[in-house]
Image: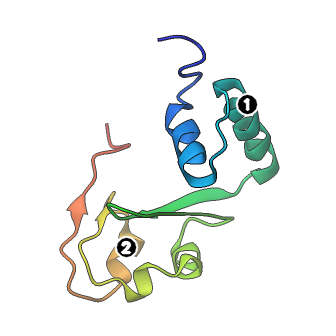
């Protein structure tokens, strides 16, 4: 793999940008954009909700229920939620059988 193919894991981001906007960017360009965004976001946290087709990303200064409410997905979600067993997820009613993600638990 060459440096152009993937610099610090930018391959998926490069692919998404090319697919969404028709703009092919180099790995170095994506790494620079990511670094600048991280500085500007400061202490904001990234939140993600995903299906097999769509991904919703949002930044919010909190991780808790306020952020989940602002994202607007879980309050009306009726499917199976895959998460890390953090207690606030269990405060949402509905017919969901949580599937636990082992990401970050090792």
The 10 Å Cα crowd at callout 1, few under 14, some 14 to 19, many 20 or more, is: some
Q: CA distance from mark 2 to mark 1?
A: 36 Å
Tell me what residue is drawn at x 73 percent, y 30 percent: 29
| Farthest front residue in view | 22
Q: Give x and y (percent) for residue 67.
A: 58, 73
- Work out whether residue 19 or residue 53 is closer to the camera in this orientation and state it: 19
**Left or right position of 103 against 32:** left
**Do the residues under discs 2 and 1 have CB atoms within 8 angstroms?**
no
Colouring chosen for the image of the structure:
rainbow
| Nearest-to-viewer mark from 2 and 1 | 1
Of labels 2 and 1, earlier in sequence is 1
The 10 Å Cα crowd at callout 2, few under 14, some 14 to 19, many 20 or more, is: some
Q: Is residue 33 positioned above or below 79 on the image?
A: above
For the C terminus, which image quadrant? Answer: top left
Tell me what residue is drawn at x 53 percent, y 48 percent: 19
Tell me what residue is drawn at x 64 percent, y 37 percent: 24
Identify the mark at residue 16; answer none if there is no mark.
none
| Farthest top residue in view | 2
Q: Is residue 75 positioned above or below 21 on the image?
A: below
Q: Secondary structure at mark 1?
A: helix
> Which residue is tagged 1?
29
- Work out whether residue 75 or residue 87 is closer to the camera in this orientation and state it: 75
- Locate residue 45: give its quadrant: bottom right
Q: Secondary structure at mark 2?
A: helix
Q: Give x and y (percent) for residue 13.
A: 56, 40
> Which residue is tagged 2?
89
- Locate residue 70: give its quadrant: bottom right
- Work out whether residue 59 or residue 15 is closer to the camera in this orientation and state it: 15
Q: Give x and y (percent) for residue 22.
A: 62, 47
């Amino acid at each position: 793999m060459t440096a152009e193919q993937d610099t610090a894991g930018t391959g998926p981001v490069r692919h998404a940008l090319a697919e969404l906007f028709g703009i092919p960017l180099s790995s170095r360009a994506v790494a620079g954009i990511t670094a600048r965004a991280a500085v500007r976001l400061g202490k904001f946290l990234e939140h993600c909700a995903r299906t097999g087709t769509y991904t919703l990303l949002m930044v919010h200064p909190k991780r808790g229920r306020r952020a989940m409410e602002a994202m607007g997905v879980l309050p009306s979600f009726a499917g199976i939620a895959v998460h890390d067993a953090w207690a606030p997820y269990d405060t949402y009613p509905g017919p969901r059988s949580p599937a636990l993600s082992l990401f970050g638990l090792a």
